Amino acid sequence: MFKFAALIFKNLGRNKVRTTLTVLTIVALVAIYSFVCTVTDVAKTMMTAHSGDTRLLVQEKWSLPSLFPVRHVPKIAAVDGVVDWTAWNAYAGVVGEDTPIIAGLATRLDNFRAMHSGLEDLDPAILEAWEKERTGALVGQQIAQQIGRKVGQTFTVTSATHPGKNLEFKIIGILPSGIWQLTFFFRRDYYEEATGDRELVNAMWLKVRDAETGKRVAATVSEMFEHSPTQVKVETESAGIARFSGHVQTIVNIITFVANVLLVNMIIAQANSISITVRERRKEMAILKVLGFQPGMILALIVLEAMLVGSISGVAGAALAYATSELNASGALGGTVTILAQFPVPAAFIVRGFFVGAAVGFAASAIPAWNVRKVEVAEVFVRL
């Protein structure tokens, strides 16, 4: 086994220039692949995570953004079958001149975990701190990176949605990664006091017992305001996700296609390098057969060599993407690239890079390795 491994490294060292070019090509392609896959992963998570038919979204039927009177809220909450509810008021603006617009949602504190998908396991200590801090905010990871703030620090939002109502917040917790990365939550009572907006809400979420109850509640709520100046529409969480998916699915498909093209390019690049190397090493393969190496062992030698190059290159490429993303978030690149800030490459991609690189190496070496195992010793030595 040790001799087999030594032979692999010896062969790699013998073709330093070609190996280096192959590694650099795969590193660059895996880095780009990591960025592309990050975008698709986030989009797919947003489209599918935590969707169901026991949560109902209530919005104004005809206007965008949705706005309906707060007096509707207790009437809707009292509908038979509604187990729990919360309301949202949107608030957005910028923190400094060089940051993108960030969006916040004012909501109830007492049932926050129960009414927000993916936050059911949020640390209760964070909610206790939130109860004591009127200006407290739970901030998505990407927003925290964009504005350069940590837990315990404050930030002031120059409002784009409520001109002249610039609010100061104190970060009391960071939201887990997922669908809330680009959102921050704050207390509804603070929103009402600071903005003076006590008459309108943007949306309302209802929790019901089961899907059948959800259908009945949705029909009841819609009928309640059918002849009202402000009509509402009610849809399940899964229906809302499906509608959102329809808008972005084409974009996700295009990005996925680009990712697959990159994989094919990686395979082609490494396959070309392996094919050239195999042709140059036919004499060596013949000698190995004379020394007792079986065809399967020669095939394994080529495949393992390619997988080693691919996996090392894959790790390096993914690590490069992750490092670039982290440097961008910290501002060390001399400025913030918005798309990288919105879709930061997670450290877990380094592990994915290993497997992607190894898979590319295997796919690229399969045909050349299969051909070289059939090298005829007599034919090679006759040519010599």
Image (tube, helix red, strand yellow):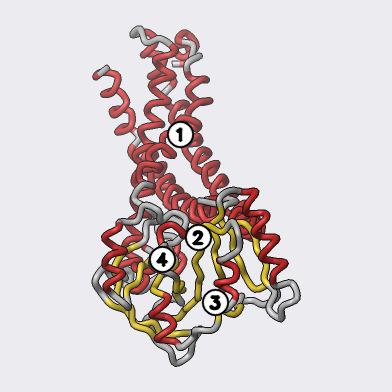
Asked if residue 61 lies left or right of residue 371, the reply is right
Question: Which circle marks residue 341 in the picture?
Answer: 4
Viewport quadrant of the N terminus:
top left
Q: CA distance from mark 3 to mark 1?
A: 51 Å
The percent position of residue 104, horizontal first and vertical second, equals 44, 73
Q: Residue at x 37, y 13 (%)?
A: 287
Work out whether 210 lies above or below 225: above
Question: Where is mark 2, residue-wise?
Answer: 84
Q: Is residue 57 above or below residue 299?
A: below
* Residue drawn at (44%, 83%) of the image: 192
Instruction: Looking at the image, tell me whether mark 3 or mark 1 is earlier in sequence order.
Output: 3
Splitting the image into 4 quarters, where does residue 208 fall?
bottom right
The amino acid type found where label 3 is placed reads: Val
Q: Which mark is residue 217?
A: none
Query: What's the amino acid at mark 4?
Result: Ala
Q: Which mark is residue 201?
A: 3
Q: Is residue 367 visible?
A: yes
Q: Position of residue 272 (x, y in %)?
A: 50, 36
Secondary structure found at label 1: helix
Q: Amino acid at mark 1?
A: Ala
Q: Is 379 or 2 nearer to us in this picture?
A: 2
Residue picked out by circle 1: 359
The answer to whether marks 3 and 1 mark residues whose Cβ atoms lie closer than 8 Å is no
Residue farthest along the right direction in this orientation: 227
Q: Horizontal and vertical percent for residue 204?
A: 55, 68
